[in-house]
Amino acid sequence: MKFVHLHTHSHYSLLDGLAKIDDIIDRAKELGMKAVALTDHGNLYGAIEFYKKAVKAEIKPILGVETYVAPRTRFEKESKIDDQYSHLILLCENNTGWKNLIQLVTKSYLEGFYYKPRVDKEILKQHHEGLIALSACVAGGISQLILNRSMEEAEKEVREYQEIFGKENFFLEIGYHPNFADAERANIGLKKLSEITGAPLVATQDIHYMKSEDAEYHDILLAVQTGNKTSDDDRLTLKADDFSMRSQEDMMEIFKDTPEAIENTVKIAERCEVNIILNKILLPTFQLPESENSSIEYLKKLANERLPSRFEIADAKITERLDYELGVIEKTGFADYFLIVQDFVNWAKERGIVVGPGRGSAAGSLVSYVLGITDLNPLKYDLLFERFLNPDRISMPDIDMDFTDVRRDEVFGYIREKYGEDKVAQIITFGTMAARAAIRDAGRALGMPYSLCDQISKMIPFNPTQGMKSGWLDKTLQKVAEFKEIYETNPDAKKIIDAARHLEGVARHASVHACGIVISKDTLTDFVPLQRAPQDSNIIITQFEMHSIEDLGLLKMDLLGLKNLTIIE
């Protein structure tokens, strides 16, 4: 390694970063990078996806965040004082650092949120172990003090961070953005502070998109964020300079006068060794009655006790199937899963909460039917158990359940009460720019007539599964003749569509998954950062979406709420 990027924003820096995780991995591989960091603004939304994909691509993933530091404490929230936060980069050196970063990000949301999720020096001291800190871009506290000509205060700030993280773990970050006068002034001050305090320099790029030619599309994204047009003056923009992922050679040339700042990127990367165990199943334990000692034995007992309620006469075919399924459940170690699900499903039924009869592969389980989880007899319809749980390919079973929408919250409440507020949360999901919306957003930001944007968007075939992902506009160009024609003959339409192709699939906002919950054996923040739902501060949600929760091996369940759900006997 010659150089490593340690300051990178993905599209999970919502409406600020343009690149998706795949784009970052692909570009890093194209440039021959052996390692790269992900440091999104204030959150860890993309961390597991990034870790998994980087490892697969044989690139070392460096997990981090660009956090916001409160000017006083995270608990003080006075207008025009406490909204003046500064930035700080935190990188995980090891698994202890990863656990501490989860704690810091969680507390920044649950305790410190005021316009942005904020930490303070108190919790940095509590959770500093295993973390390497960089002073961040010109929005960093030290750079801001330099720009305000407070060198004495800036030196004091450096020494305070050296005390918090250790002298070997705090670096002064210099970047190269020559068209921003503040950036060069900050660099001069940072170099002086390095000489005075001994804090080593580290070179970064503050990446917001992958290639230089993406700058115009990133500028459109920022205009979407702020509700401006790209032609507006006095708006948030980075178009004056390059914030792409530069090559190692470019960075070495740019910082040839401070080679130690380049070398330190490699030294930091070599120190960062986080090992996240994926796909190891982490089931919570069902609380057994005092008279019971084994989850599987209790499950067998319940199944046999409830068998007569489903079958007046249990013939050999039924008992053989039941014994077979229970044997597979024992082999795969999922007894607690069935006990947990049957417990809250039957709790709901006992209280008159309408529960769906079951859907998906779970309907193929006789054990689920006997326990009351589903109401479909799989033997009657020749449904296969192996589609649900296969003894030769062990993976977490997935029982999807429907509850009446008006009382589903009662079921959530029961689960939280039974397993603990600290072990249960709803799951985040991300709204992305769908093809049609990307056309409208891009056109609005470019100042194009609404009628043209509306005309173009209506040409795009509606597809609820593909229309939310990247590539649907490309497929539309291939398959829809009138869409291709307007693209090739109307320069304004081409400009809108080209911009929309870059925005398509980019994360736009976070919200609560309609039906996903996670239950953990241990405190959730041992594995997952939490936050409040953007739309309802009373709801606690994970920062990892459904697939990342599954990758971590945590128990994820879909409890879909359906309006007007009734069961006809």
Image (spheres, rainbow, N blue to C red):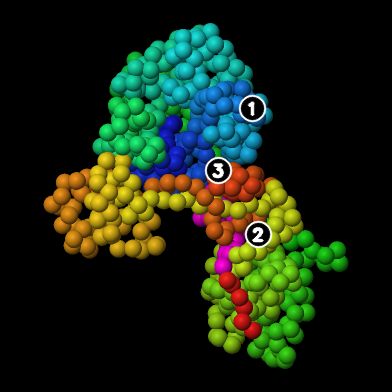
Q: Nearer the viewer, mark 3 or mark 2?
A: 2
Q: Which residue is mark 2?
A: 409
Q: Which residue is mark 3?
A: 275
Instruction: Provide residue 351's location: percent of width, then percent of height.
Output: 74, 69
User: Could you tell which of marks 3 and 1 lies nearer the N-terminus?
Assistant: 1
Q: Residue at x 43, y 22 (%)?
A: 138
User: Could you tell which of marks 2 and 1 lies nearer the N-terminus?
Assistant: 1
User: Camera-side residue: 91 or 84?
Assistant: 84
The answer to whether any part of residue 546 appears in the image is: yes
The image quarter in which residue 242 lies: top left
Cα–Cα span, label 3 and label 1 = 36 Å
Q: Amino acid at mark 1?
A: Glu
Q: Residue at x 54, y 16 (%)?
A: 158
Q: Residue at x 42, y 46 (%)?
A: 508
User: Camera-side residue: 242 or 459?
Assistant: 459
**148, above or below 528, in the image:** above
The answer to whether any part of residue 100 appears in the image is: no
Q: Which residue is mark 1?
A: 76
* Structural crowding at the residue carrying mark 1, measured as other residues with C-alpha within 10 Å and reported as few (<14), some (14–19) or many (≥20): some
Cα–Cα span, label 3 and label 2 = 36 Å
User: Camera-side residue: 110 or 423?
Assistant: 110
